[in-house]
Image (cartoon, helix red, strand yellow):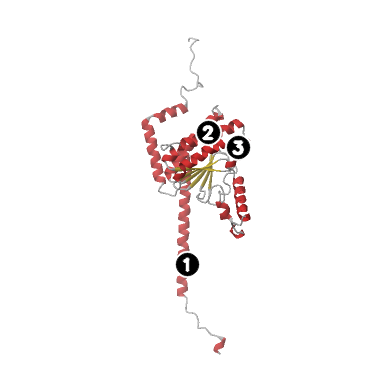
Amino acid sequence: MNPNLSTPSSTQAPLVSAGTLKKLLFAFPLFAYLQGFFKDLVISIMKTGPVPQHVAVIMDGNRTFARKRNLPLKEGHTAGAESLVGVLDACYRLGVSCVTIYAFSIENFHRSKEEVDTLFGLLREKLNYLSQNEDSYAMYNKVQVKIIGNKAMIPEDILKDLERVEERTNHNFGKRVLNVCFPYTSRDDITGAIRSISEKRINHEINKEDINMDLLDISMYFGPETPPLDIMIRTSGHTRLSDFMIWQCNYDCTLEFVDTLWPDFKFFDIMAILFKWGYYKTLETEKLKHLGKRKAKLHQTAQDILKDLPAHPPYRSVSDR
């Protein structure tokens, strides 16, 4: 055997990685057509059942995604922004009227200036991309973009750009809404609502009797037009809310914690969660319907029993004596 010739090693890396092979496969027009057809079919089937009206997402895992792939941090956030567009498209096509995303926590100001500037710039860039002309996603699909949070903390130049995005999409009111929480925490939201109510009370705009949970609810950043939260999703495997929409996560809200990193969270990931919600909502509706019929039947049975009872004896009064 020629010593200069080496035999293939069993540990030799493949010529084409799985990720590259997947991208090549997806590039074929026929495969893209079949994938689109299957997505349309899934959405059509799911539309026949209950559909949530408000879905919130904690988009966690961008930094881990970049670190695992030895990519710059910005690439992780860019990949996350691409996932967001796919998730929004799936939700709106299904019939979800309101999607809320946790774009930037007030606590994120403690991160490095480089990362904070990257997040600010990326948010401004992506929101402008979604709404910059009539053919852009938000304008074409009639999505109203709303910035939710403490705007006093946003740098003036970025705030002006975000306000322009809100103005461009304001005429889309009432159809589809994208709430961008930036910068936001629930504690700040609740504190702001209490401050607003206190000022109204001091100015005699409301009475003491007017202060209740409903007033507190509509005094928060989201306002009275936002539907109740149906589903809260957090990616990357963490099982905490990180001070996000704590007030809105009431007894009727479903929490979903998934292990998938946000940049890897795609169409079928969100559809699986929405399908699960619809399935259990259907069971709950059927259960309530059955209980209602059972109560009606028991009530009817009680009425029938009363009819079969013998007549009561004649009434007598002391005054008759």
Looking at the picture, how far across and down is residue 195, in whole percent? 62, 50
For discs 1 and 2, the disc positioned in front in the rendered view:
2
Q: Determine whether label 3 and label 1 are within 8 Å by CB.
A: no
Residue at 57% x, 86% y: name it. 318
Which residue matches tag 2?
Answer: 122
Task: Report the disc number at residue 137.
Answer: none
Q: Is residue 147 visible?
A: yes
Front residue of 42 and 57: 57
Q: Quadrant of the C terminus?
A: bottom right
Q: Determine whether label 1 and label 2 are within 8 Å by CB.
A: no
Looking at the picture, how far across and down is residue 17, in whole percent? 47, 25
Which residue matches tag 1?
Answer: 299
300 above or below 193? below
Q: What amino acid does circle 2 point to?
A: Leu
Which residue matches tag 3?
Answer: 108
Residue at 38% x, 41% y: name it. 41
